Amino acid sequence: MAARRSQTTKKPSSKPRAKKPRRVADSLTVSVLKSTLESTADGILVVDEAGTIVSHNRRFEEMWRLPAALIASNDDAGLIAHVQEQLADPQQFVRKIREHYAEPESDSFDILGFKDGRIFERYSIPLRLNGRAVGRVWSFRDVTARRRAECIQEAVYRISHTAHTADNLQQLLRAIHEIVGELMPAKNFYVSLYDPEQDRLEFPYFVDEYDLTSDVKPRKLRKGLTEYVLRTGRPLLATPEVYEGLVAAGEAELIGAPSIDWLGVPLKVKDRTIGVVVTQTYSQGVRYGESELDILTFVSSQMAMAIERKRIEDAWRGQSELLRRTEERYRAFIAQSSEGVSRLEIDPPVPTALPEDEQIDRLYAGARIAECNDAMARMYGYKEARDLVGTALGELHNVGDPANREQIRSFIRAGYRLSDSETREHAQDGKPRVFLNNVVGFLEDGQLVRVWGTQRDVSDQRHLEEQFRQAQKMEAVGQLAGGIAHDFNNLLTAILGNTQLLLRDLPPGDAKRGDVEEIRKASERAASLTRQLLAYSRRQMLQPEVLDLNVVVAEMDKMLRRLIGEHIALVTVLSPELGRVRADPNQIEQVLVNLAVNARDAMPDGGRLTIETANVDLDDAFAQAHLGSVPGPYAMFAVTDTGTGMDAAVRAHLFEPFFTTKEVGKGTGLGLATAYGIVKQSDGYISVYSEPGRGSSFKVYLPRIATPAATAPAPAKGGPDRGTETILVVEDEPAVLTLSRRALEAQGYVVLAASDGAAALRLVERHGGIIQLLVTDVVMPGLSGRDLADQLVARRPGIRVLYMSGYPGDAVVQHGELPAGSAFLPKPFSPDGLARKVRDLLDA
């Protein structure tokens, strides 16, 4: 158009047009540029090469919220500081500026995030004059609304996506909280759902910095802000002023910790309000406005649909889970049952019309285990059920055992079901097993097709019953042994007593003394035998003495070395300062022997056995940790081996009678039980420390006593002191009665002799004088020794009583036949022993 206008014929002007001054044109250009800068929606900032601000538009001031005084001051440093205070990452802002100062010809674009959530896009290009960069133009565009809209849209998509991927409602609400927290401050956030059937609010998700209880219990509807939103169906931004107005109007009341801003939005599915989503703030630095209300309202519809979907899924999943758990419980019951559970499939099926023997043969041939639990597999020596599945019934039963065929015959006759029926079978390793069975057969078209059953392994129970019967036999033998020992002691009393009387009457050098000595020695050996019988029957009597355990160990050294064998080294570590104990030396030796034998058996290939002694003080802490121990000073001896050791299961039963880990026939299980009983009877404590492959250490603690003062040895006693008192002797064994009378009369006593309690009472009635002492057997026909003594003490107060018996004193006291503390003389006894005991009792 400019060219066409130049060709148009015009009438020359009479006057040439005057040119505009240059400064007027420049002014016009500047005005156009300023108008352009002010009309743009972006904030524009122009700086020179040194970074000094040359120009900016008003939009820049508004976007950066620059105070008028700061603009008027032309303080570039203050301006930059003001800008940096608003940015979430001020270092990024400064870093980008410095990069452009270093490269003045470069362009750039980046994003600036503000602390208050605003987002700016920042553009920068060089300002050129005559082709040379003389400064830089910065352009800032506020994209907060656009980015927020994008984020909200993305949030809606993420909520929808999470509704499909979350495993449950709790996981969905946790994800929604995170999504909302990216759009707005939502540190304190909860979701409340309305249950119309119960007419109450439930809180499946609740996070609050003051109300720390995450598991908020359901509650009936009240006048909280949550109920207000649920009731009205409208969003609510409750600032302090709004909240006070609602309280004043009676629409709301405080529930929970008071907040500054409370923002709640109804969750609606179509026209139905299912709950409320709430976020609140307790800090003045975080306030809610219409923007946050719009955000939460926008995403609430998607939240409501996602929550409703997940609730339906959870309900369906709950039903499915209930079915699954029911099946799992059924499976778990079978799997974890201690009883074997199995299903046998029979192929081909067995016609029920066949004769019984043919049915049995076909059942053995065609029945196989199709399903079972691990417990049943373990009964047969397998690790898992799958190892047993597929096994034929005939491979498990002892087919040739008539009892098993009879059991199946009973199964057929009882209508293909049977309860508490025993079968004799064998495990994988061939060992016999006994099972107690309950089985039910399933019939189809007149044929037996499968059998369900349970079985219990009663092999150990049957074995224990056999052991119990054996133990009863042992107990009966023990009682018999004790009775024999008692009667034998009566005989030995007469034999030993009469040999002593004979030796007393025979002069030294008499040829008959040798024969009588042999009788005495044989009788003493017989007495030793009776003590062993009494020990076997556990009726032995302890004879405690003050002992030095070091001496006991030293005296047993040779015997222990022979006992354990040359393949085991014996080492003793004895404490020179060891305290004394009061115990029966024979019994302590028995404990040492039992522990040594136990150690020897644990080292079949050799090793080292160490016996150690030491003084030990047990404190309260030890006693609390070791049941059965008592705090105090002890002398300890330890028996330690380098053998196979024991695990915790074995240690738990170690001192139980009849418990043994040895092979059948290699041990009775009484050695350690006996040691335990002796130690406990001696008021001591025994402990064991052992680990598999690390050997064992048994420690025996016996109460330490004050060492008695050394005394000069007492002169050897001659014969017993004589007396003139009157003594009543009552004994049903004639030989013992005669011996007792002769022994006491020889010492000068007046002896009244009776063979039973009734005769003794008649003799006392006829005797008018004083009777100082009653010597009576404990067990007699008619009146017992105690009954006789009670009657005589009542008739003649002051009479003293000496009991005698073939049973030891401990046994008769424990059985209630004698009062505790009674004077007692065990059989067999010598004439001197009887006379000395009588004299001691009369002089006491």
Image (tube, rainbow, N blue to C red):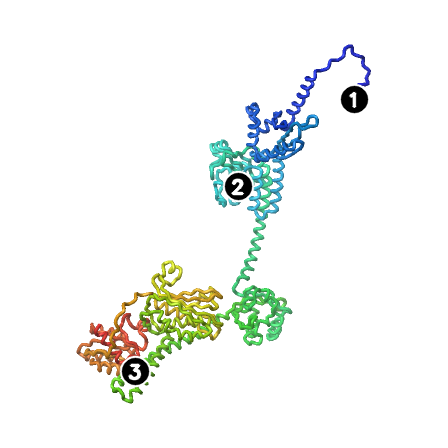
| Residue under the image location 17 percent in, 78 percent down | 769
Secondary element at tag 3: helix
Please identify the residue farthest to the left as the structure is shown: 769
Q: What residue sits right under mark 3 in the picture?
A: 496
| Residue under the image location 73 percent in, 13 percent down | 18
Q: What residue sits right under mark 2 in the picture?
A: 190
Pick whichever, 177 or 398, lies toward us: 177
Secondary element at tag 2: strand
Residue type indicated by callout 3: Leu
Please identify the residue farthest to the bottom as the structure is shown: 511
The image shows residue 22 at horizontal and vertical percentages of 70, 17
Number of labels in the image equals: 3
Q: Are marks 1 and 3 in contact (CB under 8 Å)?
A: no
Q: What residue sits right under mark 1 in the picture?
A: 1
Q: Which disc is residue 277 wearing?
A: none
Q: Earlier in the sequence, mark 1 or mark 3?
A: 1
Whether 78 is drawn above or below 575: the answer is above
Q: Earlier in the sequence, mark 2 or mark 1?
A: 1
The image shows residue 394 at horizontal and vertical percentages of 59, 72
Residue 685 appears left or right of 739: right
The image shows residue 33 at horizontal and vertical percentages of 67, 23
Q: Tell me the CA gap for discs 1 and 3.
A: 163 Å
Secondary element at tag 1: loop
Q: Are marks 3 and 2 in contact (CB under 8 Å)?
A: no
Q: Tell me the CA gap for discs 2 and 1.
A: 70 Å
Occupied quadrant, residue 179: top right
Pick whichever, 151 or 410, lies toward us: 151
